[in-house]
Amino acid sequence: MRRKLAAGNWKMNGSTASLAQVAELMAANPAPSVDILICPPATLIGQMATACLGTSVAVGGQDCHAKTSGAHTGDISAAQLMDAGASHVIVGHSERRTDHAETDATVRAKAEAGIAAGLTVVICIGETLSERESGKTLDVVARQLAGSIPDSATGETAVIAYEPVWAIGTGKVPTLDQIAEVHAAIRAALVARFATDGARMRILYGGSVKPDNAAAIFGVPDVDGALVGGASLKSADFSPIIAALSNA
Ligand code: 13P
Protein backbone atom coordinates (compact mmCIF):
# COMPACT_ATOMS: atom_id res chain seq x y z
CA MET A 1 0.00 0.00 0.00
CA ARG A 2 1.21 3.47 -0.82
CA ARG A 3 0.77 5.98 1.98
CA LYS A 4 -0.77 9.15 0.63
CA LEU A 5 1.20 12.39 0.61
CA ALA A 6 -0.03 15.98 0.78
CA ALA A 7 2.89 18.19 -0.19
CA GLY A 8 3.01 21.98 -0.21
CA ASN A 9 5.44 23.96 -2.35
CA TRP A 10 5.64 27.50 -1.07
CA LYS A 11 7.88 28.59 -3.97
CA MET A 12 9.32 32.11 -3.36
CA ASN A 13 6.64 32.99 -0.81
CA GLY A 14 6.66 33.28 2.94
CA SER A 15 8.57 34.89 5.76
CA THR A 16 9.10 34.06 9.43
CA ALA A 17 5.53 35.26 10.05
CA SER A 18 4.33 32.38 7.83
CA LEU A 19 5.59 29.84 10.38
CA ALA A 20 2.31 30.52 12.21
CA GLN A 21 0.51 28.80 9.31
CA VAL A 22 2.46 25.62 9.96
CA ALA A 23 1.66 25.75 13.66
CA GLU A 24 -2.01 26.09 12.71
CA LEU A 25 -1.71 23.20 10.25
CA MET A 26 -0.21 20.94 12.91
CA ALA A 27 -2.93 21.90 15.39
CA ALA A 28 -5.59 21.13 12.76
CA ASN A 29 -4.00 17.76 11.92
CA PRO A 30 -2.69 16.27 15.16
CA ALA A 31 -2.73 12.64 13.97
CA PRO A 32 -3.10 12.65 10.19
CA SER A 33 -3.58 9.40 8.30
CA VAL A 34 -1.59 10.81 5.37
CA ASP A 35 1.96 12.15 5.13
CA ILE A 36 2.27 15.95 5.15
CA LEU A 37 5.23 17.79 3.65
CA ILE A 38 5.93 21.51 3.40
CA CYS A 39 8.70 22.84 1.16
CA PRO A 40 9.26 26.45 2.22
CA PRO A 41 11.88 28.79 0.77
CA ALA A 42 15.40 27.90 1.92
CA THR A 43 15.42 30.81 4.37
CA LEU A 44 12.74 29.09 6.46
CA ILE A 45 13.83 25.44 6.34
CA GLY A 46 15.86 25.48 9.56
CA GLN A 47 13.23 27.23 11.65
CA MET A 48 10.38 25.22 10.21
CA ALA A 49 12.21 21.94 10.71
CA THR A 50 12.85 22.84 14.34
CA ALA A 51 9.19 23.76 14.83
CA CYS A 52 8.05 20.49 13.19
CA LEU A 53 10.48 18.19 14.99
CA GLY A 54 8.61 15.19 16.35
CA THR A 55 5.36 16.19 14.61
CA SER A 56 3.57 14.75 11.61
CA VAL A 57 4.77 17.50 9.27
CA ALA A 58 7.95 16.90 7.24
CA VAL A 59 9.99 19.74 5.75
CA GLY A 60 11.70 19.80 2.37
CA GLY A 61 13.79 21.96 0.08
CA GLN A 62 12.63 23.18 -3.33
CA ASP A 63 15.89 22.39 -5.13
CA CYS A 64 19.43 21.18 -4.46
CA HIS A 65 22.74 21.23 -6.28
CA ALA A 66 24.03 18.03 -7.84
CA LYS A 67 27.43 18.40 -6.15
CA THR A 68 28.03 17.78 -2.46
CA SER A 69 29.98 21.00 -1.79
CA GLY A 70 32.23 23.55 -3.43
CA ALA A 71 32.35 26.83 -5.31
CA HIS A 72 28.69 27.22 -6.33
CA THR A 73 27.61 30.62 -5.05
CA GLY A 74 23.98 30.78 -4.05
CA ASP A 75 23.39 27.04 -4.32
CA ILE A 76 22.54 24.55 -1.58
CA SER A 77 23.62 20.91 -1.43
CA ALA A 78 21.39 18.03 -0.46
CA ALA A 79 23.58 17.38 2.59
CA GLN A 80 23.05 21.00 3.68
CA LEU A 81 19.28 20.55 3.39
CA MET A 82 19.56 17.44 5.58
CA ASP A 83 21.71 19.37 8.04
CA ALA A 84 19.04 22.09 8.23
CA GLY A 85 16.43 19.46 9.11
CA ALA A 86 14.86 18.70 5.73
CA SER A 87 13.86 15.16 4.85
CA HIS A 88 12.72 15.79 1.26
CA VAL A 89 13.67 17.89 -1.73
CA ILE A 90 11.75 18.85 -4.85
CA VAL A 91 13.79 18.55 -8.05
CA GLY A 92 12.93 19.42 -11.63
CA HIS A 93 9.99 21.71 -10.94
CA SER A 94 8.87 23.25 -14.23
CA GLU A 95 9.69 26.72 -12.90
CA ARG A 96 13.30 25.61 -12.40
CA ARG A 97 13.37 23.84 -15.73
CA THR A 98 12.24 27.13 -17.32
CA ASP A 99 13.92 29.79 -15.15
CA HIS A 100 17.24 27.93 -14.82
CA ALA A 101 17.28 25.90 -18.04
CA GLU A 102 17.36 22.61 -16.14
CA THR A 103 17.36 19.56 -18.40
CA ASP A 104 16.32 16.01 -17.60
CA ALA A 105 20.03 15.23 -17.09
CA THR A 106 20.37 18.09 -14.58
CA VAL A 107 17.28 16.93 -12.73
CA ARG A 108 18.49 13.33 -12.66
CA ALA A 109 21.87 14.43 -11.21
CA LYS A 110 20.11 16.48 -8.53
CA ALA A 111 17.77 13.60 -7.70
CA GLU A 112 20.75 11.28 -7.43
CA ALA A 113 22.47 13.74 -5.08
CA GLY A 114 19.34 14.04 -2.96
CA ILE A 115 18.95 10.30 -2.59
CA ALA A 116 22.65 9.85 -1.87
CA ALA A 117 22.38 12.40 0.94
CA GLY A 118 19.44 10.52 2.47
CA LEU A 119 16.60 12.74 1.26
CA THR A 120 13.39 11.61 -0.40
CA VAL A 121 13.25 13.33 -3.78
CA VAL A 122 10.06 14.67 -5.35
CA ILE A 123 10.79 14.58 -9.08
CA CYS A 124 8.53 16.85 -11.16
CA ILE A 125 7.48 16.24 -14.74
CA GLY A 126 4.71 17.58 -16.97
CA GLU A 127 3.88 18.84 -20.43
CA THR A 128 3.44 22.41 -21.65
CA LEU A 129 0.19 23.62 -23.22
CA SER A 130 1.56 23.36 -26.76
CA GLU A 131 2.77 19.82 -26.08
CA ARG A 132 -0.68 18.92 -24.74
CA GLU A 133 -2.43 20.51 -27.71
CA SER A 134 -0.23 18.73 -30.21
CA GLY A 135 -0.96 15.36 -28.63
CA LYS A 136 2.55 14.83 -27.26
CA THR A 137 1.72 14.59 -23.56
CA LEU A 138 2.46 10.89 -23.07
CA ASP A 139 5.67 11.09 -25.13
CA VAL A 140 6.90 14.09 -23.14
CA VAL A 141 6.10 12.47 -19.82
CA ALA A 142 7.77 9.20 -20.85
CA ARG A 143 10.91 11.07 -21.93
CA GLN A 144 11.03 13.11 -18.71
CA LEU A 145 10.54 9.99 -16.58
CA ALA A 146 13.28 8.10 -18.39
CA GLY A 147 15.65 11.07 -18.22
CA SER A 148 14.95 12.52 -14.79
CA ILE A 149 14.73 9.51 -12.47
CA PRO A 150 18.07 8.05 -11.37
CA ASP A 151 18.59 4.28 -11.22
CA SER A 152 19.06 4.61 -7.45
CA ALA A 153 15.40 5.60 -6.96
CA THR A 154 13.25 3.30 -4.82
CA GLY A 155 9.68 3.31 -3.57
CA GLU A 156 10.87 5.04 -0.40
CA THR A 157 13.39 7.51 -1.82
CA ALA A 158 11.50 8.86 -4.83
CA VAL A 159 8.10 10.44 -5.39
CA ILE A 160 6.91 11.52 -8.84
CA ALA A 161 4.88 14.71 -9.24
CA TYR A 162 2.91 15.07 -12.46
CA GLU A 163 2.40 18.79 -12.93
CA PRO A 164 1.06 19.91 -16.31
CA VAL A 165 2.82 23.25 -16.83
CA TRP A 166 -0.38 24.86 -18.13
CA ALA A 167 -2.24 23.95 -14.93
CA ILE A 168 0.29 25.51 -12.55
CA GLY A 169 -0.99 28.72 -10.99
CA THR A 170 -3.62 29.16 -13.69
CA GLY A 171 -6.76 27.72 -12.10
CA LYS A 172 -6.97 25.37 -15.11
CA VAL A 173 -7.06 21.66 -14.30
CA PRO A 174 -6.99 18.69 -16.66
CA THR A 175 -10.14 16.59 -16.77
CA LEU A 176 -10.20 13.62 -14.42
CA ASP A 177 -9.85 11.36 -17.48
CA GLN A 178 -6.76 13.25 -18.59
CA ILE A 179 -5.23 12.94 -15.12
CA ALA A 180 -6.11 9.24 -15.04
CA GLU A 181 -4.54 8.65 -18.45
CA VAL A 182 -1.23 10.26 -17.53
CA HIS A 183 -1.02 8.72 -14.05
CA ALA A 184 -1.68 5.27 -15.53
CA ALA A 185 1.07 5.83 -18.09
CA ILE A 186 3.46 6.98 -15.36
CA ARG A 187 2.65 3.94 -13.22
CA ALA A 188 3.20 1.59 -16.17
CA ALA A 189 6.57 3.20 -16.93
CA LEU A 190 7.65 3.03 -13.28
CA VAL A 191 6.69 -0.64 -12.96
CA ALA A 192 8.41 -1.47 -16.26
CA ARG A 193 11.64 0.11 -15.05
CA PHE A 194 11.63 -0.43 -11.27
CA ALA A 195 9.33 -3.48 -10.84
CA THR A 196 7.99 -3.63 -7.27
CA ASP A 197 9.71 -0.35 -6.39
CA GLY A 198 7.86 1.22 -9.31
CA ALA A 199 4.59 -0.05 -7.88
CA ARG A 200 5.48 1.49 -4.50
CA MET A 201 6.57 4.92 -5.77
CA ARG A 202 3.97 7.56 -5.05
CA ILE A 203 2.64 9.68 -7.91
CA LEU A 204 1.33 13.12 -6.95
CA TYR A 205 -0.82 15.36 -9.09
CA GLY A 206 0.05 19.07 -9.06
CA GLY A 207 -1.43 22.13 -10.75
CA SER A 208 -4.22 24.30 -9.30
CA VAL A 209 -5.26 21.79 -6.62
CA LYS A 210 -7.73 23.63 -4.38
CA PRO A 211 -10.08 22.68 -1.55
CA ASP A 212 -13.00 22.51 -4.00
CA ASN A 213 -11.42 20.17 -6.58
CA ALA A 214 -9.19 18.05 -4.33
CA ALA A 215 -11.67 15.27 -3.51
CA ALA A 216 -12.45 14.60 -7.17
CA ILE A 217 -8.77 14.53 -8.12
CA PHE A 218 -7.93 12.21 -5.20
CA GLY A 219 -10.58 9.79 -6.47
CA VAL A 220 -8.57 9.18 -9.64
CA PRO A 221 -6.68 5.84 -9.69
CA ASP A 222 -2.93 6.15 -9.12
CA VAL A 223 -3.22 9.66 -7.68
CA ASP A 224 -1.37 9.15 -4.39
CA GLY A 225 -1.58 12.74 -3.24
CA ALA A 226 -0.87 16.26 -4.42
CA LEU A 227 1.89 18.80 -4.80
CA VAL A 228 0.13 22.06 -3.99
CA GLY A 229 1.39 25.58 -4.64
CA GLY A 230 -0.85 28.54 -3.87
CA ALA A 231 -3.33 26.61 -1.73
CA SER A 232 -0.57 25.33 0.56
CA LEU A 233 0.37 28.78 1.83
CA LYS A 234 -2.50 29.06 4.29
CA SER A 235 -3.60 26.38 6.72
CA ALA A 236 -7.23 27.31 6.00
CA ASP A 237 -6.74 26.18 2.38
CA PHE A 238 -4.29 23.32 2.87
CA SER A 239 -6.14 21.64 5.76
CA PRO A 240 -9.27 20.84 3.69
CA ILE A 241 -7.02 19.42 0.97
CA ILE A 242 -5.34 17.19 3.58
CA ALA A 243 -8.79 16.18 4.83
CA ALA A 244 -9.92 15.31 1.30
CA LEU A 245 -6.82 13.13 0.85
CA SER A 246 -7.42 11.44 4.21
CA ASN A 247 -10.96 10.57 3.11
CA ALA A 248 -9.98 9.38 -0.38
P1 13P B 1 -0.41 25.78 -7.89
O1 13P B 1 -1.04 24.81 -6.93
O2 13P B 1 -0.28 27.15 -7.36
O3 13P B 1 -1.01 25.68 -9.25
O4 13P B 1 1.13 25.27 -8.07
C1 13P B 1 1.37 23.95 -8.35
C2 13P B 1 2.83 23.71 -8.24
O5 13P B 1 3.60 24.16 -9.07
C3 13P B 1 3.32 22.94 -7.09
O6 13P B 1 4.65 22.61 -7.24
Image (tube, rainbow, N blue to C red):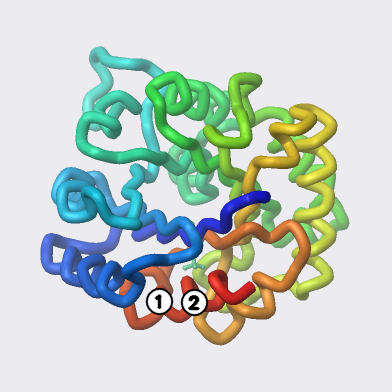
Q: Is residue 243 above or below residue 167?
A: below
Amino acid type indicated by mark 2: Ala
Q: Is residue 169 left or right of residue 27?
A: right
Q: Is residue 59 above or below residue 87?
A: below
Q: Position of residue 43 (x, y in %)?
A: 18, 47
Q: Is mark 1 within 8 Å of ligand 1?
A: no
* Residue 102 appears in the rendering: yes
Q: Quadrant of residue 78?
A: top left
- Give the CA distance from mark 2 to mark 1: 6 Å
- In the displayed image of the protein, which residue is found farthest to the right? 135
Q: Quadrant of residue 151?
A: top right
Q: Residues within 10 Å of mark 1 (few under 14, many from 20)?
A: many
Q: Which residue is mark 2?
A: 243
Regarding mark 1 in the picture, which secondary structure is present there? helix
Q: Is residue 92 left or right of residue 80?
A: right
Q: Is residue 164 left or right of residue 25?
A: right
Amino acid type indicated by mark 1: Ser
Residue in the foreground of this view, choosing between 45 and 196? 196
- In the displayed image of the protein, which residue is found farthest to the front? 31
Q: Residues within 10 Å of mark 2 (few under 14, many from 20)?
A: some
Circles 2, 1 touching at the beta carbon (< 8 Å): yes
Q: Which residue is mark 1?
A: 239
